[in-house]
Amino acid sequence: MKCIYWNIHSIEDIKLIINILEQEKPDVFFISEINDDFINNNLHKLQEIKYEILDNPGCERVKIIKNISLQVRIDLQNKYYTTIFIEDINTYVVSIHLPSQMFQHMKALKEFIRDFRLDIDKEIGCSMEKRILVIGDFNVSSYEAPMIDFDGFITTNSIKSRPTITNLGKKRISYYNPTWQLYSRKHFPWHKIF
């Protein structure tokens, strides 16, 4: 399975989207900050290359473009994130787009990220028992407190890290965050597309 997330920053060039879809052939392409009219006016171009928009009315900030042949169902959602379940591979994919730090205090973002993580744990389950991919724009860096702290999302930069962290007798499972490795590279994988 291949998933891509792009915060498009209101770029209105369908050719860029089509190029990514044709070159990378993702199963699912999540897009944030895109004009609804723009995407709706270009549905026919997506359909020509066998992609469609998946309606997710519970989430205002993430649009879902998926391969027409991929069978998914919408799951847990709110204004800032949307979840799809892919039954064929028994996997949940959660795409998030949080508000910018320009408009939110870091402590407020950390609280929201913690609550988001607790929602996943409660509604979907533990990442040690379920296949869960979280992808998107948290609007914080991978190594900042909201992402790594015990009272945040609890991510680690190594798959060899301890999966369970205990703090004052309370146990929580960590998520592996591969973006730490991406930040160490000089070129991101998608540079060839533009």
Image (spheres, grey):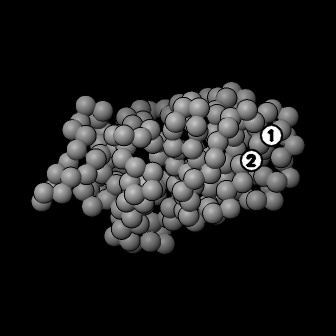
On the picture, is 13 further left or further right than 81?
right
Q: Which mark is residue 122?
A: none
Residue depicted at 54% across the width and 56% down the height: 76
> Residue 21, how many percent across, how many down?
70, 34
Identify residue for label 1.
Answer: 46
- Camera-nearest residue between 90 and 147: 90
On the picture, is 174 further left or further right than 31?
left
> Are the two marked residues, 2 and 1, in contact with CB atoms closer than 8 angstroms?
yes
**How packed is label 1: few (under 14 Cα within 10 Å), some, or many (20 or more)?**
many
> Residue 83, how many percent across, how many down?
56, 51
**Foreground tag (2 vs 1):** 2
Marks 2/1: CA–CA distance: 8 Å
Residue depicted at 38% across the width and 54% down the height: 121
Residue 57 sits in which quadrant? Answer: bottom right
Residue depicted at 81% across the width and 59% down the height: 37
Mark 1 residue element: helix
- Camera-nearest residue between 107 and 194: 107
> Residue 153, how many percent across, how many down?
34, 55
Identify residue for label 2.
Answer: 53
Quarter of the image with the C terminus in it: top right
Mark 2 residue element: strand
Q: Residue furthest left?
A: 168
Question: What amino acid type should be assigned to the residue bearing mark 1?
Answer: Leu
